[in-house]
């Protein structure tokens, strides 16, 4: 079910950053920011810290344990070969395999986690607020949990090119 939201269009990144600072200070609910490129300043003001790095560490630890168990099983239990007087279980040759498989599995699982969490999948239609968002404009989408008229005044004061209400 669509609800009416306040949408402000900015063509200047600095003005948007200034508006975000004011809106965060006033505790206005910022739903999203659409833009032609991502900037760290805007992302810090709009989003919270991602938990994806913690998941990557968990995936890495799991991958290294599973790969070590697989290598141990194949070299010691399933098919032990004693050649040239070397021990059946030798750890140094496994280090390279453990390292590479850990990186591979961590990357694959982190990518799948990101896509699953963001609901990004092949064939999903793009959510484009306006055609100018792909060229040169930023769009700030706000919830109307505060006084809408006061929010519109603040956005105009901070340099918004246009402020409208849209169903999203």
Image (cartoon, rainbow, N blue to C red):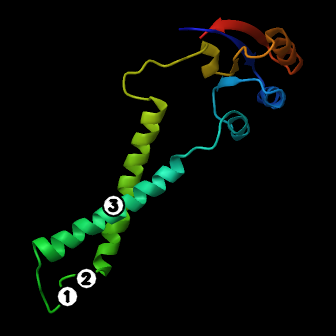
Toward which corner of the image does residue 38 lie, by quadrant?
A: top right
Residue 4 left/right relative to 91: right
Question: x, y (%) of residue 46?
Answer: 69, 33
Up/down of 135 relative to 2, above or below: below
Toward which corner of the image does residue 33 lie, by quadrant?
A: top right
Foreground pick, 50 / 164: 50
Question: x, y (%) of residue 114?
Answer: 46, 39
Toward which corner of the image does residue 105 lie, by quadrant?
A: bottom left
Dots 2, 1 in contact, CB < 8 A = yes
Q: Which residue is mark 2?
A: 90
Q: Which residue is mark 3?
A: 101
Up/down of 150 relative to 78, above or below: above
User: Please, what secondary structure does the residue beneath circle 3 have?
Assistant: helix
Question: Alpha-carbon neighbours of circle 1 within 10 Å: few (<14), some, or many (≥20)?
Answer: few
* Mark number, residue 87: 1
Q: From mark 3 to mark 1, how far is it between C-alphas?
A: 24 Å
User: Please, what secondary structure does the residue beneath circle 1 have?
Assistant: loop
Q: Of marks 2 and 3, which one's residue comes earlier in the chain? A: 2
Q: From mark 2 to mark 3, how far is it between C-alphas?
A: 18 Å
- Looking at the rendering, in which quadrant would you find the C terminus? top right
């Amino acid at each position: 079910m669509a609800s009416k939201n306040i949408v402000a269009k900015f063509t200047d990144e600095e003005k948007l950053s200034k508006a975000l600072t004011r809106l965060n200070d006033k505790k206005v609910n910022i739903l999203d920011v659409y833009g032609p490129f991502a900037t760290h300043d805007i992302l810090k003001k709009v989003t919270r810290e991602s938990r994806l790095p913690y998941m990557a560490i968990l995936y890495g630890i799991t991958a290294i344990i599973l790969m070590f168990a697989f290598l141990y099983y194949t070299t010691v239990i399933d098919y032990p070969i004693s050649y040239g007087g070397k021990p059946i279980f030798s750890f140094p040759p496994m280090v390279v395999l453990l390292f590479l498989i850990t990186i591979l599995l961590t990357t694959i699982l982190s990518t799948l986690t990101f896509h699953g969490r963001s609901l990004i999948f092949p064939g999903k239609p793009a959510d484009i607020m306006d055609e100018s968002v792909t060229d040169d404009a930023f769009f700030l989408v706000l919830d109307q949990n505060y006084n809408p008229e006061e929010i519109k005044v603040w956005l105009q004061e901070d340099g918004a090119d246009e402020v409208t209400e849209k169903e999203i």
